Amino acid sequence: LERRRFPVKELRALASARSGGKTVSFSGESVAVREATAESLSGVDIALFSAGASRSHALAPAVLASGGVVVDNSSAFRMRPDVPLVVPEINAHAMAKHGGIIANPNCAAIILTVAIHPLRQLAGLERIVVSTYQSASGAGARAMEELVEQTRGHLAGNEPAPEVFKWPLAFNLFSHNTDIQENGYNGEENKVIEETRKILEMPKLGVAVTCVRVATLRAHCESVWLEFDRPVSEHDARSVLSTAPGVILQDDRANNHFPMPREASGQDAVFVGRIRRDLHNPNALQLFCAGDQLLKGAALNAVQIAELVTAAR
Ligand SMILES: NC(=O)c1ccc[n+]([C@@H]2O[C@H](COP(=O)([O-])OP(=O)(O)OC[C@H]3O[C@@H](n4cnc5c(N)ncnc54)[C@H](OP(=O)(O)O)[C@@H]3O)[C@@H](O)[C@H]2O)c1
């Protein structure tokens, strides 16, 4: 909010009761953190929710009752037909009609759709196959701390037992930590499938996805195979991606320099590269992308939505 000079008249910093007494700094001022309750939310114009789905369900009515808008970062409302699921570079038009709640999509779905949406200018998209490489911070602040402590402990020979994740993440990777659901996909994979279809407004798009947690701290990567309804050249793909909003084309074959989490961390754009054609299917291309899931995959996207809400008032 501060970096983008969002027109804030009053900022309320809300968390759980555990954070009572803490402060956050905003525009040179120290703001006391208060408990998120119906009372502390009363009268707000825009509420940016990011405390999990159950909190969103519990607290949204208080914001709506006083005429405010909720931009929700949890999965609570994303697939509700009356709630727009918005990535501003792609479907800002979906915000024309909303009932006070606008959902911020899943982080892996945002990074994926920002990378592939520009390619839809070139040909009809038929099917995508995605594998993700998701960092510890996607599971929250405690998961980042766990990876750091575990890495230190592993090297020193006194590795602590994992608490946030079921398995050790240091020097490891594993199938995404969300539960496997009835269709054999885990919760994260089903979010990527359903939310990608909703954001792209392609309810029948074929999406096959494997979500994996890897031992990086920040930024998610994705390996993406795309099939179109006709051939798309590498040259044309690079050309549209080089000017696409929210994308940085990073496709330097000579130096083997392609998207990676450490370079994507702290950046607003989604980095896209390794663009190459499928050697056996003339209608298919492959690419690799990296995006900071705490920024474009969460906070930045939410603030961009809030900017659109403010502009429409
Ligand atoms: N991490 C990501 O990359 C990412 C990306 C997209 C969406 N999300 C979504 O964002 C939400 C938060 O995830 P996170 O990764 O930021 O988790 P986190 O680092 O664990 O932070 C959770 C936040 O929620 C607050 N909170 C917890 N219980 C609360 C309660 N009962 N009342 C009020 N506030 C409460 C916490 O406050 P205290 O410090 O006081 O406990 C903390 O500020 C989740 O819905 C997640 O799915 C996360």
Image: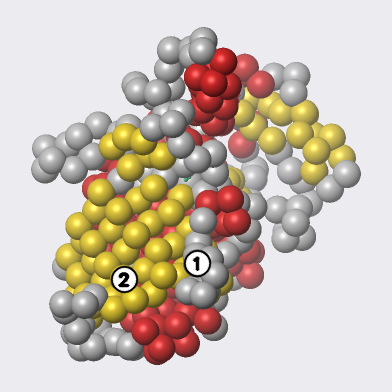
Residue at point 76%, 53% (across, down): 2
Q: Give the tally of numbered discs.
A: 2
Q: Position of residue 25 (x, y in %)?
A: 80, 38
Q: Nearer the viewer, mark 1 or mark 2?
A: 1
The answer to whether the residue bearing label 1 lies less than 8 angstroms from the nearest atom of ligand 1 is no
State whether residue 100 appears in this view. Answer: no
Q: Position of residue 80 (x, y in %)?
A: 30, 52
* Label placed on residue 286: 2
Residue at point 20%, 82% (across, down): 283
Disc 1 secondary structure class: loop
**Residue 111 position by quadrant:** bottom left
Q: What residue would you read off at disc 1?
A: 256
Can you name the residue that lies furthest to the front here?
254
Q: Position of residue 195 (x, y in %)?
A: 31, 57
User: Is 96 situated left or right of 199 in this image?
Assistant: right
Residue at point 32%, 35% (across, down): 174
